[in-house]
Amino acid sequence: MLEFAVSAPFDPAADIAAGIIPAQFPWLSLSILFPIVGALIVPFIPDQGEGKQVRWFALAIALITFLITVGAYLSGYDPGFSGLQLSERVSWLPNLGLTWAVGADGLSMPLILLTSFITALAVLAAWPVTFKPKLFFFLILAMDGGQIAVFAVQDMLLFFLAWELELLPVYLLLAIWGGKRRQYAATKFILYTAGSSLFILLAALAMGFMGGDTPNFEYTVLAQKGFSTGFQLLCYAGLLIAFGVKLPIVPLHTWLPDAHGEATAPVHMLLAGILLKMGGYALMRFNAEMLPEAHAQFAPLLVVLGVVNIIYAALTSFAQRNLKRKIAYSSISHMGFVLIGIGSFSALGTSGAMLQMISHGLIGASLFFLVGATYDRTHTLQLDEMGGVGQKMRVMFALWTVCSLASLALPGMSGFVSELMVFTGFATDEAYTLSFRIVIDGLAAIGVILTPIYLLSMLREIFFGKENAQLTTNTNLVDAEPREIYIIGCLLVPIIGIGLYPRLMTDSYRTAIEALVERDVSAMEVISRPTAPLIRSGSLTPAMLRAPQVISSNGS
């Protein structure tokens, strides 16, 4: 029979020796379960019909969850330690090898904080929701716990369950509260994401059962198994598809513009601020960390795909006349820098990828919230139907301008720092040939040039374009409300703070990134040696990729 019990006593001394620090208080389990339990209480809250009581309850739960994650960071997380911290482990289904294992390191802790922060603001952004408010806030709170679980769990099978369970709330939020084509967008979302996640299950089962009869899916165990290069390549390819859909990577991206095109403002914030970061995090956690030899061979492909994302999505965004789809393609373009950073063998470049995820989570959430606020006033998303509203919505124009400047990587904003780190880290990465680095950085720079063009022209068309007399006379174009100013203000504080002093964020994950890059560089050197089995079998490392020690041995 399956049983639920505390497992065979875990030895704290052995955990510390293995680079794991047990939690003194179950901060992470509490941050996952608290919003889920809060969501289960929502149906029983007495309400008068428009959700006034429910939204205050949901806001309180989301804020407390945010404070719990802050408490975890302040009391149990050491940024200078690269191993797993706040570790909690309970044997859940031992016959299946499934363990309730949660923990945090530099790859997950910043994203856990980002998740709880963005969700709290999304609840506040959902204040005007009056249609089925109990179900709406139930789904938002359930998503909060599910998304924190994706970043906090340390068991690959548990990760798959959290990844899958998080999809259902997004589907319902799109299908019930979306626009005219909401059913199409929601169905496309679930087909893409649920279908591709089968690769996660297959890879998890293969990795968990490899090397023994008793399965074990914990990350620390999987990372030490020493999988063969061929096995790593198969798992890497499957996981790249699964996580590439969520990032998203072109051409697996087409669900995102449709989803954003039909979503409401709070759902926008969760999609852009958190959901896309799950793909980038998973690429770092599984592909780069657990499959280092395969990553060394796939890394040039990631870099090339990153450039394709940047240029293709920027050009497509430039051509969009629908405001939501324009910002959606802008998000895809910015996530290309994450791929380049992950594909680099530079601590600076990989750190830039991590910072880009955090930065874009904040900037993307702010822009999509403003899109929703603008639509509530103009009742249109077509740029051709907007224009001349700058005089009536001056504060809204100011908020749009500041957030757009952050998105186009203005110096002093977080986007500038993260993209500069990726550029510089890749340009100085000696793992790649000089010509390849020049070409990649040159092409990526084209996307950086296109971004201000389509964002500034967008601002001009909305606020100072040819005036639409019907819009300006027949529509109640009220300026930004205090609640809206507060939400954007909360997002701008970390955007500007990180831009002015990046170490506020980079110090929280620097040691973990350095350990990850060191592991990948070691794997790259192994597969690049002439005596390596992979080379003897006739499969060569990509010509663009070279290990520094191979260069020195040839004297070149």
Image: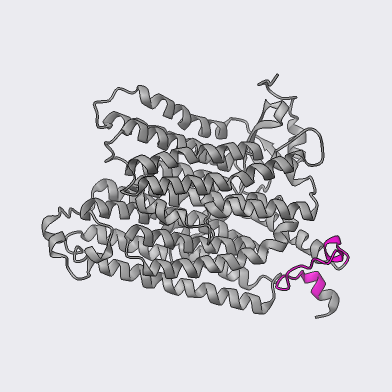
Is 546 colored magenta in this rendering? yes
Is residue 47 positioned above or below 349 on the image? Answer: above
Residue 546 screen position, x and y as percent: 75, 71
Q: Quadrant of residue 316?
A: bottom left
Of all residues, the one furthest to the left in this rendering is 473
State which quarter of the image contains the C terminus. bottom right
Q: Quadrant of residue 93?
A: top right
From the image, which quarter does the N terminus lie in?
top right
Would you place residue 263 above or below residue 471 in this image?
above
- Residue found 44% across the figure and 42% down from its top: 170
Residue 41 in percent (x, y) is at 40, 24
Q: Is residue 139 above or below residue 266?
A: above
- Tell me: residue 161, above or below residue 91: below
Q: Is residue 348 visible?
A: no
Residue 148 on the magenta span? no
The residue closer to the viewer here, 486 or 385, is: 385
Instruction: Report whether residue 40 is seen.
Output: yes
> In the rendered view, does 236 fall on the left or right side of 74?
right
* Residue 518 found in image quarter: bottom right
Magenta span dominant secondary structure: loop
Residue 284 lies left or right of residue 263; in this view the side is right
The residue located at (26%, 55%) in the rendering is 374
Left or right placement of residue 90 versus residue 251 in this view: right
Q: How is the image coloured?
A: one colour
Q: Which residues are magenta?
A: 531-551
Tell me what residue is drawn at x 81 percent, y 72 percent. 550
Image x and y of residue 340, in percent: 59, 65
Q: Position of residue 70 (x, y in %)?
A: 50, 40
Q: Is residue 138 left or right of residue 335?
A: left
